[in-house]
Amino acid sequence: MNYPTGVKKDYEKEVYHGNRGMALEDDINETNQYYLNNNIAVIHKKPTPISIRKVDYPSRLEAVIKEAYFKVPSTTDYNGIYKGKYIDFEAKETRHLYFPLANIHKHQIEHLRKVVNHGGIGFIIVRFSKLGETYYLSVQKLFSFLETSTRKSIPREYFMTKGHLLKEKYSPRLDYLNIVDKIYFEGE
Amino acid sequence: MNYPTGVKKDYEKEVYHGNRGMALEDDINETNQYYLNNNIAVIHKKPTPISIRKVDYPSRLEAVIKEAYFKVPSTTDYNGIYKGKYIDFEAKETRHLYFPLANIHKHQIEHLRKVVNHGGIGFIIVRFSKLGETYYLSVQKLFSFLETSTRKSIPREYFMTKGHLLKEKYSPRLDYLNIVDKIYFEGE
């Protein structure tokens, strides 16, 4: 598997420069809040990892960070608990008609692999923003792709055939636990 | 339960002003790294939640945060997976000979309550730095205290009788999963 250089830069761009990634993040945050309010699951987005260099204290009560840098995340952005199971996932938006693997850090893939090895449920959520399509792809299917392909991106067809389309609704906006139910809790 | 004002300030002080809290954090981070390296568990500290107001881009490759503020955390600092179980805890160091409840945010207590309701394992780790004693206290015991006492702090005796002393070792420095084993996996 080949990770092009500039992964860090790309990541920051997606999160901080433009609107790319924010719409999906909003939808997932709203969905997680719905799950929390309705006592369905406890899943949160982790804060953005930063390295703090300088903090000012203009008053006794106030602390202002004056210099800090974005760090490469060592885990995924989202985790929590659902029906007693540990849940862990990463969410990415792309304007391409394929999913560039550079959008996910190697550390994050390794993290997801460990999660699954310890009995957790791992997946990625990918939105093709130009098509308005959002998919759930289990890490098992992600790993199969990585093991059998040398491509630097996952084609949309792979998500269509191996993943699950997440239909957007009013509330919750992106009911990804519905797919978790189908894969892990069906027939219980 | 009574939360004094200034909780946010206290929290930031513990984390950023002095060394208070850092030694325990280091010990737990080292322990988590040991668990990760030895394929025992996947448990990470969440990044400090901050609110970013201003980012400069001195070059195409670099992003510098020039203004940001600490946010009150809505969850605990540590979570992950162990033997298929969701693990969630908060760690605090105190120089007092009792544990002031103001050291834990109300949001964090509520979060731990939800975690347990969904089948997760929750606890707090408290170090009495002047005594060099570190305790594991399950959230069940924490909740019993909160429900039966109007005190604004938990006496050390409560940790001694209802909690578990975590003996410090060379590696892992603070083997808290040993206690999780005793409570949840004994006899398996």
Image (cartoon, coloured by chain):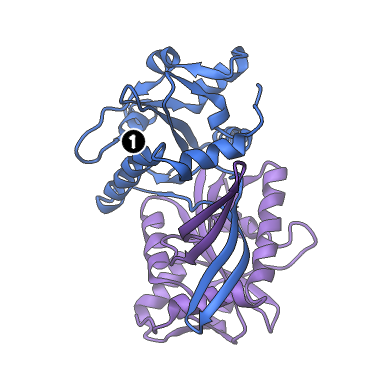
Chain colours: A purple, B blue
Secondary structure category for the residue under label 1:
helix
Say if A118 sits above or below A131 in the image. above
Determine which quarter of the picture holds residue A24: bottom right
The answer to which image quadrant residue B97 occupies is top left
> Viewed as shown, does residue A127 lie left or right of B21?
right
Asked if residue A135 is positioned above or below residue B179 in the image, the reply reads below
Camera-side residue: B173 or A24? B173
Q: Is residue B118 visible?
A: no
* Closer to us: A185 or B173: B173
Q: Position of residue B21 (x, y in %)?
A: 41, 38
Image coordinates for residue A81, horizontal then vertical, percent = 54, 46
How many numbered markers are drawn?
1
Instruction: Identify the residue at image location x=69%, y=63%.
Output: A26
Residue type beneath disc 1:
Leu
Q: Residue at x 36, y 55 (%)?
A: A117
Which residue is identified by label 1?
Answer: B177
Q: Residue furthest right?
A: A170
Chain letter of mark 1 equals: B
The x, y position of residue B63, in whole percent, is 51, 74
Going 46% across and 73% down the picture, which residue do you hit?
A104
Camera sees residue B94? yes
